[in-house]
Image: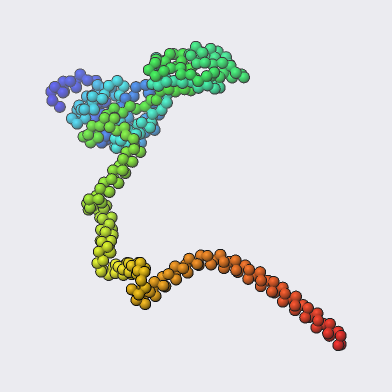
């Protein structure tokens, strides 16, 4: 410590020295240091948020001049975030990714009552319907605050939906009190992240506030586009080589077939294609003398097969009908045979009785 620093330190109360040293120790311990605003956060909610996040972040509140002093003495890279120190400030120490830290602090924000004299952040609306209040002076208090109220069937009700304070307007004491009693909380309070130091990099809050779903969609779209481009320009990478090889094999196979290159892998296809072409050509020749007997036979077989296939579909219905008819005829014949046998048996019995 040089003489000038020692001289200044001699006039600084020990508790301030201790707090500066505490900040410097936390700065050296954590990779991420953030400056956050804490204005308008009620003490109870502030303590609750600190308690809920204690496992992943450490939040400390110091005087602004002590924060500035500690940042200046800790690391020259930290100095830029000192410009974010102002008003009511807290330091946040963590090893979380800055983007995760931003989302964590954002999600920790809660609704809170609006104080008298505070500016409405948005239009404040009371909705028509019953309240939990019993008839009494509360009706006059609500009306004095500009809230349309009356007694209906033994209950205090809001007569109509109404905007009782527009965005940018100051809220009166009477309205503030009635909104709290109606459990209408227009304010959203929480840590207002201003800037973050992350291992030598300074990030402002607007750079951290991203739409995660849109970001993921953009990454997926870019990845698909890059893959398709690599395939189109035949750019080999570990991700594209399997597709490029499959495409090259398919293109080579098609080229070999179209060029009639006799390769073992495609010889069967070439012969099948040649036979189909020959049969099509033969079928277009009208002079039977121009074709040999074997070729005419093949053509006739092809025609017969087509006719048989066509007749097969029609024959199925006829077969079903014929089967039903045959079944009925067989049943009639069986009945006639049974009746004939019965008559023969009766005749035999009669002869037996006659001739003893």
Nearer to the camera, 234 or 198: 234
Dividing the picture into quadrants, the one containing residue 18 is: top left
Res 17 visible: no
Q: Can residue 130 be seen in this view?
A: yes
Q: In which quarter of the image is residue 322?
A: bottom right
Q: Is residue 346 left or right of residue 300?
A: right
Q: Where is residue 176 in the image (x, y as percent from the top left)?
A: 45, 17
Q: Nearer the viewer, residue 270 or 8?
A: 270
**Image point (20%, 18%), residue name:** 11
Quadrant for the C terminus in the image: bottom right
Q: Would you identify the image quadrant in which residue 168 lies?
A: top left
Q: Single out the residue that lies furthest toward the left.
A: 3
Q: Position of residue 246 (x, y in %)?
A: 28, 58
Image position of 143 with respect to 311: above or below:
above
Q: What is the x, y in percent for residue 38?
A: 34, 24
**Residue nearest the observer in this picture, 242 or 137:** 242
Q: On the picture, is 211 further left or further right than 236? A: right
- Name the residue at 34% across, 76% down: 292
Q: How is the image coloured?
A: rainbow
Count of numbered labels shown in the rendering: 0
Q: Residue at x 39, y 25 (%)?
A: 188
Q: Quadrant of the N terminus?
A: top left
Query: 305 or 145, which is in the foreground?
Result: 305
- Residue 112: give x, y in percent of width and height: 42, 24
- In the image, residue 154 sits, relative to residue 312, either above or below, namely above
Residue for point 17% across, 20% down? 8
């Amino acid at each position: 410590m040089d003489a000038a620093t020692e001289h200044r330190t001699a006039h600084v109360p020990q508790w301030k020295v201790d707090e500066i040293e505490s900040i410097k120790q936390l700065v050296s311990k954590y990779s991420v240091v953030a400056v956050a605003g804490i204005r308008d956060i009620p003490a109870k909610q502030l303590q609750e948020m600190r308690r809920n996040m204690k496992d992943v972040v450490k939040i400390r509140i110091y005087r602004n001049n002590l924060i500035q002093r500690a940042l200046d003495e800790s690391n020259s890279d930290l100095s830029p975030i000192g410009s974010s120190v102002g008003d009511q400030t807290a330091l946040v120490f963590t090893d979380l990714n800055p983007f995760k830290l931003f989302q964590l602090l954002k999600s920790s924000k809660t609704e809170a009552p609006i104080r008298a004299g505070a500016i409405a952040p948005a239009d404040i609306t009371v909705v028509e319907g019953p309240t939990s209040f019993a008839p009494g002076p509360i009706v006059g208090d609500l009306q004095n605050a500009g809230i349309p109220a009356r007694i209906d069937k033994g209950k205090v009700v809001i007569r109509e939906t109404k905007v009782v304070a527009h965005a940018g307007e100051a809220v009166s004491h009477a309205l503030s009190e009635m909104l709290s009693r109606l459990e209408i909380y227009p304010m959203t309070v929480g840590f207002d992240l201003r800037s973050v130091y992350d291992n030598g990099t300074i990030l402002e809050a607007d750079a951290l506030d991203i739409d995660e779903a849109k970001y993921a969609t953009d990454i997926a779209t870019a990845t698909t586009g890059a893959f398709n481009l690599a395939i189109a320009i035949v750019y080999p990478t570990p991700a594209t080589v399997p597709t490029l090889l499959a495409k090259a094999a398919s293109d080579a196979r098609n080229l070999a077939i179209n060029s009639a290159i006799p390769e073992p892998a495609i010889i069967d296809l070439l012969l099948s294609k040649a036979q189909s072409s020959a049969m099509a050509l033969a079928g277009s020749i009208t002079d039977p003398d121009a074709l040999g007997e074997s070729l005419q036979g093949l053509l006739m077989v092809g025609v017969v097969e087509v006719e048989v296939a066509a007749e097969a579909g029609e024959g199925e219905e006829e077969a079903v009908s014929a089967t039903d008819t045959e079944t009925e005829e067989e049943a009639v014949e069986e009945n006639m045979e049974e009746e004939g046998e019965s008559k023969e048996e009766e005749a035999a019995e009669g002869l037996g009785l006659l001739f003893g």
